Amino acid sequence: MQSERTVDRAFHPASAPDYVPRPQMRQLQLERLKAVVRRAYDHVDLFRRRLDERGFPPDRLGSLSDIQHLPFTTKADLRDTYPFGLFASPIEDVVRVHASSGTTGKPVVVAYTRQDLDVWTSVMVRAFAACGLSRGDVLQNAYGYGLFTGGLGAHYGAEALGATVIPVSGGNTDRQIMVLKDFRVTAICCTPSYFLHLIERALELGVSMRALPVRVGIFGAEPWTESMRGHIEAEGGIQAFDIYGLSEIIGPGVAVECPCHRGLHVFEDHFFPEVIDPDTGRALPDGEEGELVLTTLSKQAMPMIRYRTRDITALAAEPCGCGRTVRRMSRIARRSDDMIIIRGVNVFPSQIEAALLAVEGTLPHYRILLTRHKGLDKMEVQVEVTPELFSDKIGSLEGLRQRLAYAMERVLGLKVQITLAAPRSIQRSEGKATRVIDRRDPANEVRHEDPSTVSVP
């Protein structure tokens, strides 16, 4: 495949593959699918073994519909082959490694060759162009840098587009507002909940976001609703765009909204989308809601074959008013598993449980309470303690709370409020335990009786 490293700084979106006729796109997809399956078969033991078990070698791929004969890949496969077991390139060809949180404390490791980074840059250029950005825009990149894919993915794409990038990263809200104001920023990348927090804090500092030059926000890394978009646009005076991606596939840049806001255009020349029934694995037609499955069509270092994202969506093939011919996916509003996203960090109840039970003095009964304060997501973990400790001195409880908070931050990578509950105070269930109570959306608030708790300041 021809390298996409060189991106025209005077980018013309109509020249992108987003606009090619569907027959031409499908032919390109088939050629790339055959090549990536062959690469995975030749260089990755897991894929070769599974294809052999199915009696479906790569040369049997004759049409795009044959993708249904290929095995699924899941997050568990990345965990089980940690750290480099799914690499299809030798380490000397891998120029970058990223990682995201996994369900057992082990990160999910992803790798990139130079060509992979070129592809990532090119799809991010197309994403920013779809959001109306161009050379001369000033982009404040408030996604986290480091092992998280968001920061660097957005950074290199915006630079290649010709925008001026301010790599402010996450956190330090007052500085973020100062930069927005003083550097005359025209676009910002961050999570939607963090932008809501920026709006609230700016008002406290006497700064009206509507009075600033910011006109575009590109928000991702967590689910958000149309009502949140309306609030962001009204209070921030911007146009808000949804961007989608995941580390296992490439990072941000798998799909993005256009100004029509009728779903997110998937960059199908690099990521082949399917929607399946999450229970049966059966492929569903366009328009029907199910679990999104993605296959990388050009990834070298770590190809993903039919990766189950656990995100629930639907695909739309009808033309969009923007002229793009690539299919659209509906906004991700929920998942088929129990993953929680807090300020862009993936959190699983199983991680919380493991951290809690590793500290002596707690019982295996806990509850996770999610709230939103001034636009920023908060997580409280209520956990029962043993009768001996609950009846002990306040100092003992405070020591336990501190140990739990430390264990949680070490495992999750974020600070969590810990509330110690009396024995037998958290409601039991005869079926599946209700571990998570999400009060971030008042319309979906789950009302319940609070347990007897001890809040240790």
Image: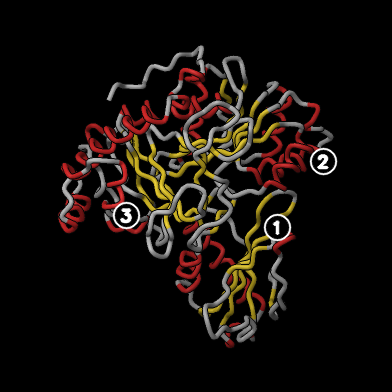
Q: From the image, tell me which residue sits under label 3.
A: 72
SS at mark 1 in the image: loop
The image shows residue 284, relative to residue 150, as above or below, that is below
Give the Cα separation between the discs numbered 1 and 3: 33 Å
- Residue beneath label 1, please? 441
Mark count? 3
Please say whether residue 366 is visible from this viewpoint. yes
Using the rendered image of the protein, determine whether residue 362 is visible from the camera's viewpoint. Answer: no
Quadrant for the N terminus, please: top left
- On screen, residue 208 above or below 77: above
- Quadrant holding the C terminus: bottom right
Q: Residues within 10 Å of mark 2 (few under 14, many from 20)?
A: few
Residue 204 circle label: 2
Q: Residues within 10 Å of mark 3 (few under 14, many from 20)?
A: some
User: CA separation, marks 2 and 1?
Assistant: 23 Å
**Residue type, mark 2 in image:** Glu
Q: Earlier in the sequence, mark 2 or mark 1?
A: 2
Q: If you read the primary sequence from the N terminus, does the residue marked by circle 1 or circle 3 appear first?
A: 3
| Rendering quarter of residue 4 | top left
Front position in the image: 87 or 388: 87
Q: Residue at x 50, y 15 (%)?
A: 11
How far apart in space, not on screen, are marks 3 and 2 (Cα)? 49 Å
Dot 1 alpha-carbon crowd within 10 angstroms: few under 14, some 14 to 19, many 20 or more: some
Q: Residue at x 67, y 24 (%)?
A: 185
Sequence-earlier tag: 3 or 2: 3
- Does dot 3 land on a helix, a strand or a loop? loop
Name the spot of residue 381 as percent of width and height, x first: 60, 67
Closer to the camera, 36 or 429?
36
Give the residue type that dot 3 points to.
Answer: Phe
